[in-house]
Image (cartoon, helix red, strand yellow):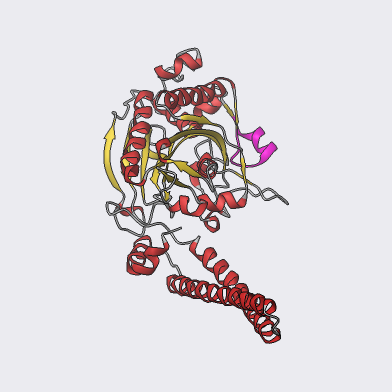
Amino acid sequence: MLDPKILREEPDRIRNMLKARAVDFELDALINLDRQKRELIIKTDELRKKRNDISLEVGKSKKEGKKASSLLDEMKKVSSDLEKLESEQNKIESQYTKLAFTIPNLIHESVPISPDASANKEIRGWGKIPQFDFQVKDHIYFSQALDLVDLERAAKIAGARFYALKNDLVRLNQALINYALDFLSEKKYTLVQPPFMINRNSMEGAIIAEDFENVIYKIQDEDLYLIGTSEHALVAMHSDEILEGSQLPLRYAGTSPCFRKEAGAHGRDQKGIFRVHQFEKVEQFVFSRPEDSWSEHEKMLSTAEEFYQKLGIPYKVMLLSSGDMGKISSKTYDIEVWMAGQNAYREIVSCSNCLDYQARRLMIRFRDKTNEPTKYLHTLNSTLVATSRTLVAIMENNQTKDGHISVPQVLQKYFGKSTI
């Protein structure tokens, strides 16, 4: 949700944002609803004051022994008018909120403007693409040859794009999670394993729900959804709270499974474990003072980069264009890692600054002193590791000539050996 002040005073700024994102949005309707809402607030306040004034007059007349029937008739009419206005006000406010909750976030000035990914900008790269003196194989081959993944039996249980990890890949998956939690814990992140389900109010505070209806799983006959990422649960943890400024920044490391329908995926990604309905992820999430959020954004990106450097996986950092990034983000970096078996870089990390957009939706504020007015804080999120895709990168980049997989050194103490 955007600051209503911007809607009223800088509508062209919002129009430019919508054009840059190539989003069709009823901005004039929202501006009109905002105007009606404010006018109704004034009118209902005036009628409440008038009703109170008449009530005082009625009391005064009764004390003086005078008849108050005309005043009572007037108060009855004012109360009836007020009831109608309040009903209209509730209707307009509901329409306003529903529409305001679908408007995208403002865009940072550094973001490339384009309706699609064609203008995504490479910021930097790290690592050397591995060279092999043998036939390079993809992770699907190793999954079968080393008995690491069972797709057929998983499909019997849950359908396509589910998987069962087996043998050493179960342990390597856990090694990645344990290493990631230790990695963020050393950087003073608070570890959190949130509920794996989320109610609609919390979800709508974190995302534009209409955009995710076909992405996340709904629990039948319950006001609950399976989480698509721990980010949504982490931001909702502090809904309707006023935090102490001295607590900020709050840095959370969320660990959870993630459930996504992944509608529309096709081709080679339908096989193996790169694009699946269920995976595990360790997420960075930060609540920041507004003036610090851009430096926090760069810090989160740097943390994610350090993690993949320690794993020894080559990558490049991409700044996403206005049409390619999510609607709640003001600026997003992706980290794309090299996948030797696919001979391509693939996205593995998304790092975003959402400014006060989520905080306004969830009423998360802070103040430095008790008698000071509250302010909305900024929220930021970044993948640290989505284990299934990182397992793919490890299997494909660390393959050996004799058909095995070398385990990154930083994972060996968690995994227990150096080779699969």
The boundaries of the magenta stretch are 150-163
Query: In this picture, is 224 found above or below 342?
Result: below
- Quarter of the image where one finds residue 165: top right
In front of the other: 373 or 20: 373
Please state the horizontal and vertical placement of residue 191, each as a whole percent of the image.
50, 29
Is-magenta flag for residue 100?
no
Which sits in the foreground, 41 or 295? 41
Q: Residue furthest right?
A: 221
Residue at 32% across, 27% down = 130
Q: Camera-side residue: 5 or 111?
A: 5
Across and down, in percent, residue 38 comes to 48, 72
Q: Is residue 159 magenta?
A: yes
Q: Residue at x 42, y 50 (%)?
A: 376
Query: Residue drawn 42% across and 45% down?
Result: 367
From the top left corner, tell me how far across and down residue 386 is, in percent.
48, 34
Rendered location of residue 172, percent (x, y): 51, 22
160 and 292: which one is in front?
292
- The correct choice, above or below, for 8 with respect to 149 in the image is below
Given the current orientation, which residue lies at the most extreme bottom position?
A: 70
